[in-house]
């Protein structure tokens, strides 16, 4: 009986130790200005965000809900050089574009202060559907 109490006590202590120290990971504060977004309002509706999730690494997430006609599309980020992101045909479901994700080895400064254009590349000729500025979240 005495061994069962000792074993149970040790088990409880080890469980508490494990739970407390595995959940005590330090929380890294995010610096202001690590997120930019673009809201497309007319003729398309949708949102695209870019998050710097590690130093020098950004992830673009987006989705368009309306205003898309059959064809092929790409996103163009203004600047020198112009960055072009082709949207896979499998994601295009008129009247929208399914959620997409792209990763870049860039800082958020490569996007802040620039514009994002949605371009229909086919059928020819290429047509800029809409251009909107990136808006910096938590910036100066």
Image (spheres, rainbow, N blue to C red):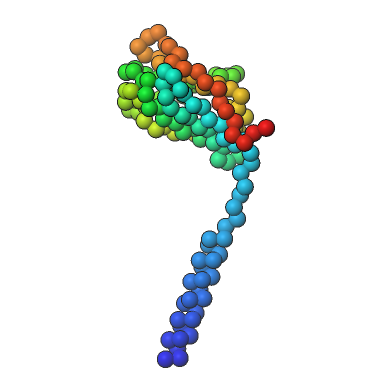
Residue reaching furthest bottom?
Answer: 1
Residue reaching furthest right?
Answer: 140
Taking the image as drawn, is residue 57 in sight? Answer: no
59 relative to 66, above or below: below
Picture quarter with the C terminus: top right
138 relative to 12, above or below: above
The residue at the point 49 percent across, 81 percent down is: 9
Position of residue 118 in the picture relative to residue 34 (left or right): left
Residue 47, given in percent of the width and then of the height, sits at 46, 29
Position of residue 13 in the picture relative to residue 96 (left or right): right
Foreground pick, 139 / 106? 139
Foreground pick, 29 / 87? 29
Residue 89, given in percent of the width and then of the height, sits at 34, 24
Residue reaching furthest top?
Answer: 125
The residue at the point 58 percent across, 41 percent down is: 54
The residue at the point 49 percent across, 26 percent down is: 39
Picture quarter with the N terminus: bottom left
Question: In this figure, what is the number of numbered marks?
Answer: 0
Residue 58, given in percent of the width and then of the height, sits at 54, 35
Residue 88, given in percent of the width and then of the height, sits at 37, 26
Foreground pick, 29 / 124? 29
Foreground pick, 108 / 55? 108
The residue at the point 51 percent across, 68 percent down is: 18
Taking the image as drawn, is residue 27 in sight? Answer: yes
């Amino acid at each position: 009986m005495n061994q069962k109490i000792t074993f149970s006590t040790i088990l409880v202590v080890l469980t508490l130790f494990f739970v407390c120290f595995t959940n005590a990971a330090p929380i890294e504060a995010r610096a202001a200005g690590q997120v930019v977004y673009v809201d497309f309002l007319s003729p398309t509706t949708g949102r695209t965000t870019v998050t710097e999730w590690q130093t020098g690494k950004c992830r673009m997430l987006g989705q368009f809900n309306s205003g898309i006609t059959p064809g092929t599309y790409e996103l163009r980020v203004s600047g020198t050089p112009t960055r072009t992101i082709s949207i896979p045909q499998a994601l295009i479901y008129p009247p929208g574009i399914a959620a997409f994700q792209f990763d870049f080895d860039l800082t958020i400064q490569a996007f802040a202060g620039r514009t994002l254009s949605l371009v229909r590349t086919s059928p020819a000729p290429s047509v800029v559907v809409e251009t909107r500025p990136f808006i910096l979240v938590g910036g100066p």
